[in-house]
Amino acid sequence: MAAGLGAGQLTAGLARDLDPPVVSVGNRVVDATPAWLKSFAIDTFGTGDKTALIVGTVLLLAAASVLAGMVALRRSLAGGLAVVAGFGLVGMAAAGLGSGGWGWLPSAVAMLAAGASLALLTRLTTRPPTAAEPGPTVDRRRFLTGIGALAVSTAAALAAGRALRSRFAAEVERAGIRLRRPVEPLAAPPADPATTIAGLSPLLVPNADFYRIDTSLLLPAVTVETWDLTIDGMVERPLRFTYDQLWDRELHEYDITLSCVSNEIGDDLVGNARWVGVRLDELLAECGVRADADQVMTHSVDGFTAGFPVEAALDGRDAIVALTMNGEVLPAVHGYPARLIVPGLYGYVSATKWLSRLELTRFDRAQGYWVPRGWAVRAPIKTQSRIDTPRSGSSIPAGATAIAGVAWAPIRGVTKVEVQVGDGPWQEAELGPSLGAATWRQWWITWQAEPGTYLVRCRATDGTGTTQTREVTPVAPDGATGWHTIKVKVER
Ligand SMILES: Nc1nc2c(c(=O)[nH]1)N[C@H]1C(S)=C(S)[C@@H](COP(=O)(O)O)O[C@H]1N2
Ligand SMILES: [Mo]
């Protein structure tokens, strides 16, 4: 029965509107309890009345387990399974079997797991009767091993189910958070050229399409009741901020392009978003950074860490502890309740999600998660440009066609993008609207395509006047270089 409860709890972790079997039954019992009995329960157990109900249900199941086991051993396995099935059906009925929906699923899975466990234990552990020992006898050693294995898997299933369900609590809480206005809200974004050039990346990437990089397998489900942000280490005054305290501070809104160091030339581990948050330099000023600190080590609740130079926090760029993304409370997958965004630095050294602590330290004392794994200590984002359309390897009809894409060089800004078709001259592309030096810029040219097969490449020049190098280097240890080159076939 315990194995069944574990399997049921795990199943209930699949979706928000599924309840673990005991909860389904408990809810029904509460609904059906006459008022006098309810007040008796509340008088007797106080606020522990729910716990009492659950404990009662579990005790009842334990007794049923003993019954099912005895029937299976003394009479027949089928009899024992019938007891299990009876309880399973009660659970399924309590969860609204027949009323549409999937509520009955956890109880059904629980019933199957409990039945299978009973069958397994009886088969594994009973010895056929002998002359010396008439009647079935139990092999205690195998029985205990079997029970032990089941107990371990049950505990694992319960823990995993609970972890899965805790994310629903975070979702519910996140949905109830009220946004507050930044001190100087940005103007609405300009008309997006991507609406007229098919295949071009949007100026701001919607949250649902934004790339994701996580080291943890299970999404950290943080609820703000238990969350806070600590700033400590080499500071005069260590401070702690609750989620509400961050919201109550001056909020700033910035457009910032985030990129992964693992972005191969032409790849899409990069995106631009509008963020609202608290300026990192203001938080650090309050704590008083000691002169000998040279690294901000950021810690996540999931154990991830990322470190970057103190200068990057204090040199005037718009580094923030972000609370929103594109006008929405930070999505769980992008770091709810808070993450760091430092313009111009790759994500792995700066963009810590589910942020819990900023530790002022030194580069000779601490290393972020990826550094001992072969990635560079300091990692400013390299200038890259990408052709979005046409797609490499595609065939297009002859005639006027757009070659278009995006280029980024945070925080130097993109000043020029050039395109070369075949061995032709480099042509300067038209640039889309600028949201500032920290963001990507769209670009395009119109190409009068004649039949044939072509290599098309692009290169960007940043605000310092430096043009992307043609030299191809891999993403490790500090970001790829080279010109994005695609092959297109123009049909007759
Ligand atoms: N806690 C945590 N934060 C993290 C990571 C991570 O694995 N765990 N990945 C980093 C990396 S490598 C990148 S590129 C960015 C990606 O942010 P996104 O998933 O919101 O796009 O987050 C950074 N922050
Ligand atoms: Mo990354």
Image (cartoon, rainbow, N blue to C red):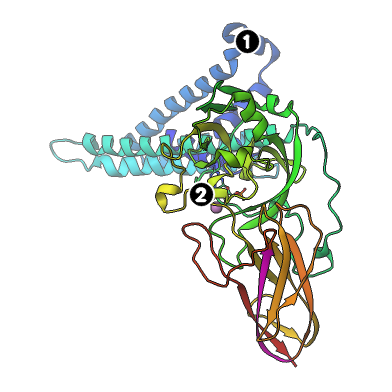
Characterize the magenta stretch by its predominant secondary structure.
Answer: strand
Q: Nearer the viewer, residue 258 or 175?
A: 258
Give me the C-alpha separation between circle 1 and circle 2: 60 Å
Q: What is the x, y in percent for residue 322?
A: 67, 38
Q: Is residue 211 visible?
A: yes
Q: Nearer the viewer, residue 141 or 300?
A: 300
Number of marks present in the image shown: 2
Q: What is the x, y in percent for residue 9?
A: 52, 37
The magenta span reads 451-461
Q: Which mark is residue 161?
A: none
Tell me the kind of residue under disc 2.
Answer: Arg
Quadrant position of residue 393: bottom right
Q: Which mark is residue 378?
A: 2
Image quadrant containing the C terminus? bottom right
**Residue shown at 77% from the left, 72% from the top:** 429
The residue that disc 1 covers is 42
Image quadrant containing the N terminus? top left
Tell me the kind of residue under disc 1.
Answer: Ile
Is residue 318 one of those drawn in magenta?
A: no
Q: Are marks 1 and 2 in contact (CB under 8 Å)?
A: no
Q: What is the x, y in percent for residue 28?
A: 64, 27
**Residue shown at 71% from the left, 83% from the top:** 425
Position of residue 162 in the picture relative to residue 179 (left or right): left
Disc 1 Cβ-to-ligand 1 distance below 8 Å: no
